[in-house]
Each structure stands twice: as structure tokens, then as C-alpha cells.
Image (cartoon, rainbow, N blue to C red):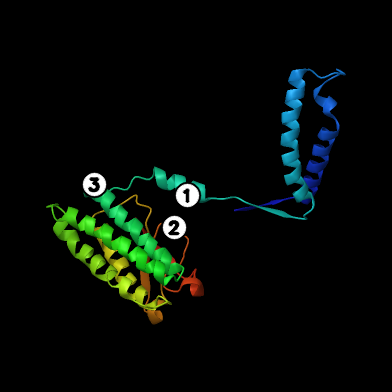
Amino acid sequence: MNLKINNQKNHHYCLFVLTLVARPSFFMGNQKTPTFAQNFFLMRFFCIILICFAIGSTACNNPTTLVKVNTDSLKAAAKAARVPASNMSKEGTVLMMSVVEKYYGLKNALVATKADSAKRTAVNLLAMTGILKHYLESDTAFGKGLMPYVDTIINEANQIPAIEDEHCEKQRIHFEHISSAIYGMAKKSGLKNAGIYHEFCPMAFHDKGAFWLSDDNEIRNPYFGSKMLECGEVTDSL
């Protein structure tokens, strides 16, 4: 979010700061000799004033100053407060969300079109999915229904580290299958409150279209990367 600061107000602000610096008697009243407490207070105050003046003077020298408000901390706070739930046990839900987090790593590597990073993140996804599979083997309630999705994730992720394609086109083919499998697994398990956005690009794979998952509703296309970074739309959320 960007806030425009009016230049005239900045000019008045700068004059106010200069006036305070030039008239320390404002804090001393009619005393000619300041007390120790007043000296201590004035030193602290003028340090703050100097910092404010440095910021204010920058604003005074520009017709319009754009102040960028960072929203990353707000998103992080919302994510930390969110508690995903599913029809599985708490342990099973946590493991499934861990797989999703590893998937995001692969997705981000493809958004950036970084083949080496895609290989590393695919290995991480493979390892975490293996842990989930081991858990599901003893889950009599949901293991059988979710295992086909897990096997697809493992089989497709296992192909990516061996691929040599600096443009990541071949990796993206396997990524599409992984995306579908993770989404199917999440829906099958009744996952909710997970902050997962199901997003779609109609132009992927020669206009066939393809889906992916993200932890942000802001589109960052993993099928085209910087070529068409914002191509797509949110179609569902979990």
C-alpha cells in the first residue's frame, strides 16, 4: 500500500522541527540554567529531533514522497493465527500441511524459473511425502482413500531431480500432476482453514490450461514465470 504525503505539509513539518531545535527554552520556561533532568531530557529529545529532521528533510526536498507500507508482517501474523483442520487426526493434518509447504518451495522455484532450485525443492517434497505415506499406512480410516494421491506426488516429484532443462518446461509438466494430486488429497481429507488458494492459468500448455496451489491470492504463475507472471485467477480456497 502506498500513501502520498502532501509536499506543503512536509514543508510545514520541517519548519516546525527547525523551530524546536532553535528554541530549547521552550522546554525550560524562564530558567537561565537548566537542571540535570532538563539537560538529560533535552539530549534525548534532540537526538529524536535529528532523526525526525533527517526523514522530514527528505520529504521536503521531494514534490511527492511515496511511503511503502510493508504488509508481509500482517500476512505472517494471519498465517500464524490460522489453525488448519481436516477429517484426519491432528498429526495427519500437520503432516499433510508439511507436504503442502514443501510443495510451495517447488512452486516458487518454477515461478522464478530456477531449475537447480526446482530439483532441490522436489527432493524436499519427496522426503516429506514419504513421511506422510508412512503415517497413512497405519491410518485405517483415511489411508486407503488418500494413498493414490500420495503415490502420484511421489512418482511425479521423483522425476524432477533427473531433468536437465534450464527453462523448466519439462519440470512444469510433472508439477501440474503434483498440483492436482495435492489438491485432490486436500479436498478428499476435508482440509479447511489452511490458507490454500487454488489458482488457474488458461494459457498454460498451449491453452490447455493448468492449476496450481498457493499460500497467497496474488497471482504468481509457475507455468510461465516472468513471461506472464500475473496470468491466472483464483478458483477456490481451502
Mark pair 1, 2: CA separation: 9 Å
Relative to 183, say whether 206 is above or below. below
Are the residues flagged by discs 3 and 1 in contact, CB closer than 8 Å?
A: no
On residue 75, the disc is 1
On residue 91, the disc is 3
Mark pair 3, 1: CA separation: 25 Å
Mark pair 3, 2: CA separation: 24 Å
> Which SS class for mark 1?
helix
* Location of residue 150 by image quarter: bottom left
Amino acid type, callout 1 = Lys
* Residue at image coords 23%, 46%: 91
Give 163 or 106, whichever is nearer the viewer: 163
Q: Badge 2: how crowded within 10 Å, few (<14), some, or many (20+)? A: some
> Which SS class for mark 2?
loop
Give 176 or 22, whichever is nearer the viewer: 22
Q: Is residue 92 left or right of residue 82?
A: left
Give 89 or 54, whichever is nearer the viewer: 54
* Residue at image coords 56%, 50%: 70
Q: Is residue 159 left or right of residue 147?
A: right
Percent of width and height locating residue 177: 29, 71
Are the residues flagged by discs 1 and 2 in contact, CB closer than 8 Å?
A: yes
Percent of width and height locating residue 199: 39, 65
On residue 216, the disc is 2
Q: Earlier in the sequence, mark 3 or mark 2?
A: 3
Tag count: 3
Amino acid type, callout 2 = Asp
